[in-house]
Amino acid sequence: MNIVVVLMLGVVRTGFAQDRKTYEERKARLEREIAIIDKQLADNAAQSNSMLSDLELIRKNISNRKALVDDADRRVRQFSDSIYLAQLEINRLQVRIDTLTSHYSRLVRSAYKNRDARVWYMYMFASENLGQAFRRFGYFRNLSSQMKSEAQNIRTMQEDLEAKRSRLSEMKAEAESVKAERVKELERLRKDEAKADSVVKRLKKDRKKYQNQLSAKKKEVNSLNREIARLIAQAMDSGTQKKEQKKKAPVDLKLDGEFSKNKGKLPWPAEGPVTGRFGKHYHPVYKNLELPPNNGIDVAVSRGTEVKAVFDGVVSQVIVMPGYNQCVLVQHGNYFTLYCKMKSVSVKTGEKVRTGQVLGTIDTINGQTQLHFEVWKGNTPQNPESWLR
């Protein structure tokens, strides 16, 4: 039974330490995302009239807070298991110390009874034969050494016991801290859910107003999609032209191959929560109302955040689009990446860029501070989240 407890505790300790690091990293990331969204919502309260944007941000916060609560629940369960096994080990160690102490007490009593050297000699001389005399002599000679060894064992185990009790106290305190933070997060979650309900009521109250906003947004999205498709088609056509025409360099097939090999490994162009996902979606309130198609993703960031190239390439175009401000289109062979909603751009058309190179900084547009990012394979838009690590 004791061996089983020790083995179980060893396994739990290893997993507990590994999971603690993962938990802390994930918690920090979720809290950073929540902070970014809270800042945007606070800014939007003063200047934005886009309830749909607010609802998307609030619901992303709700999702993140639920993840924090779920992680806290799992962490509390792990603490409970670890505390239980640690207590079992402490009990086992205490029993072992009690046994050693009892044995040590008997040694001390024996030594006390035989503390007079004359008694030792009489005891040895009273031996029936020489062999017994040697054995009795060895007993007295080793008694002191054995007492020292047993005393050291007891001290070592007592120190180990105190260390385990200290760690147990730390785990209990940490578990209580996680529980307290969980309670606070649940309260924040309830407030965010109340905000979401309020926004939904406002959206339902003035459907015509928000449908007009949606129509304007659709025009912006469709204009961007058409322009990017046109630019990509133009770049691909130029790449297949004969060299003597010298309009543009041919497609870099080596770069094309390297880009395709890095699917799922590309670095993020900017860090933040994804608030708009790839593809077609429906309005969260008016379920039968289709939203403008998203050929990329939208990442909420802080104003002034630097946008970085996700792979080596050549700047194909720098354009300005309504609702998207400045956009940079980077060509990677037959692949393209698009970075939009920038306040400033630090590259120019035809410039070679490297992975991680700053392309520009993000601006706030209509109360939204977001990077719009797209990945294209030829003239077909891809889900960027499938390409990013």
Image (cartoon, rainbow, N blue to C red):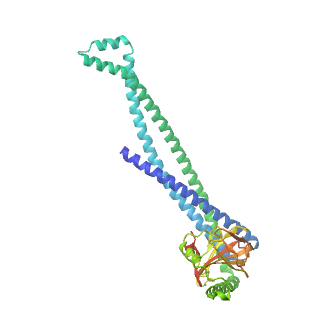
Which quadrant would residue 222 be assigned to in this image? bottom right
Quadrant including the C terminus: bottom right
Q: Residue at x 55, y 58 (%)?
A: 23
Which quadrant would residue 344 be assigned to in this image? bottom right
Using the image, determine if residue 21 lies above or below residue 266.
Answer: above
Q: Residue at x 61, y 59 (%)?
A: 28
Q: Is residue 143 visible?
A: yes
43 or 285, nearer to the observer: 43
Q: Position of residue 360 (x, y in %)?
A: 72, 71
Which quadrant would residue 127 be assigned to in this image? top left
Q: Residue at x 45, y 30 (%)?
A: 152
In the image, taking residue 130 as reference, residue 176 lies left or right, namely right
Quadrant including the N terminus: top left
Q: Residue at x 50, y 38 (%)?
A: 162
Q: Position of residue 306 (x, y in %)?
A: 70, 68
Q: Is residue 215 visible?
A: no
312 or 100, nearer to the observer: 312
1 or 307, nearer to the observer: 307
Using the image, determine if residue 218 lies above or below residue 48.
Answer: below
Q: Position of residue 251 (x, y in %)?
A: 61, 82
Q: Residue furthest left?
A: 128
Q: How many marks?
A: 0
Q: Residue furthest front?
A: 244
Using the image, determine if residue 387 lies above or below residue 3.
Answer: below
Q: Position of residue 372 (x, y in %)?
A: 66, 75
